[in-house]
Amino acid sequence: MLKIILYSLIMLLPLPGYAAIIKLSSGDSINAQVIDNTDSYIKVEHSVLGTLTIKRSQIISLNDDEITPVKLQSTTVSASEVEVSEEALKDNGLFKRGWVFPGFDRRFSLGISGKESNSSNIDVYTAFDADYENDYKRWDIGFRSNYSSDDRDSTDNDFRIHVNRDWLNPDSPWRYFAKGQYDWDQFKSWDYRLTGIAGPGYRLIKNERLELIGRTGLSLKKEYGSDDDDLEAELMLGFNSDWKLAKLQTVEFGTEFFSPFEDFGEIRNLSHLDWIYKLTDDDRQLSLKLSLDYEYDWNVDPGDKHDEFIYRTSLVWEL
């Protein structure tokens, strides 16, 4: 009796390695040899089309036997398993420290070039950026450093760190912002400079590919180690844009013009243009970045140039 029951069950099951007529939900039929049959798909060998893998959800019947969706059995998940899943999805911040920029988009950039022949040259550029945004606030924190040497003598050595906070209104294009910036440069007329800016901003353009924001505000600047080390009030006007050229390409642009209230025409300008191309698309995304930085200052020491133009290539890692 047991043998008869087992034989009957086997005959009712569609086993791999047999010819079958498969009717699809599209209305087509396929006459092929079944080589694998699972709960989620059926793999067949067709005389013309070759090996095909068909999802069971796309199959109406197999040899006139109706295919019914596989009903998943409910399982009970313990509280500890839920906690483990939530912990696995949680962003633990930079270096998984929990308190170092958790929830931020973090990127590290590195660019190195050098030459060793009759003379020795090296250029090193490093940067770190962390961004966070929701409906009510936005943070932009970052630093960048440049170092260049010629025959082991420094020709460029500077460092900049900035912190920007935006207060957003989800129902309005207006916003308010406050920004603090520290600059150190070995070859400027000053040793280091502190800048604080606050004012309103306005979202001029916002769509799936382009965002353009205008800003204006009051800037306070203080230089140390300079002949002109008085606290200076300036008017700032700036723009920031983020343009997605394609799925893998992005262009970021930003510029800020500063003009002192006492000498309105003696402007200075900080601008940057970055083209970013994604090389990978995973959790630790790698990108190629081409950058152009421009700085202009009306007040410089005698013999120094008013403007500085820097271009570089670097790799960017998502952290």
Image (cartoon, rainbow, N blue to C red):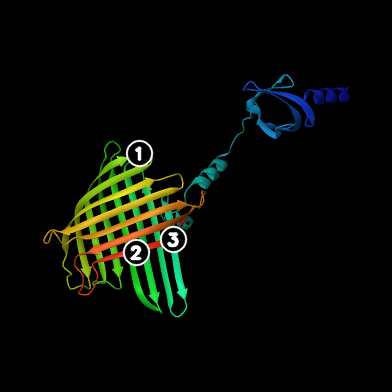
Toward the viewer: 154 or 101?
A: 154
Q: Is residue 251 left or right of residue 53?
A: left
Counting from the top left corner in percent of width and height, residue 139 is at 34, 50
The residue identified by callout 1 is 207
- Classify mark 2: helix, strand or loop: strand
- Mark 1 or 3, nearer chain start: 1
Residue, x 30% and y 61% (percent of image)? Answer: 294
Residue, x 38% and y 58% (percent of image)? Answer: 291
- Classify mark 3: helix, strand or loop: strand
Toward the viewer: 254 or 81?
A: 254
Tag of residue 310: 2
* Quadrant assignment, res 245: top left
Q: Is residue 48 left or right of residue 80?
A: right
Residue type of the residue flagged with mark 1: Asn
Mark 2–mark 3 distance (CA, rounded to whole Å): 13 Å
Q: Is residue 259 above or below residue 124?
A: above
Is residue 312 visible to the viewer in this orientation of the structure? Answer: yes
Residue type of the residue flagged with mark 2: Ile
Query: Is the residue under label 2 in contact with that under label 1 (CB below 8 Å)?
Result: no
Q: Residues within 10 Å of mark 1 (few under 14, many from 20)?
A: few
* Quadrant assignment, res 273: bottom left
Q: Is residue 87 above or below residue 316?
A: above
Tag of residue 314: 3
Toward the viewer: 140 or 213?
A: 213
Q: Nearer the viewer, mark 1 or mark 2?
A: 2
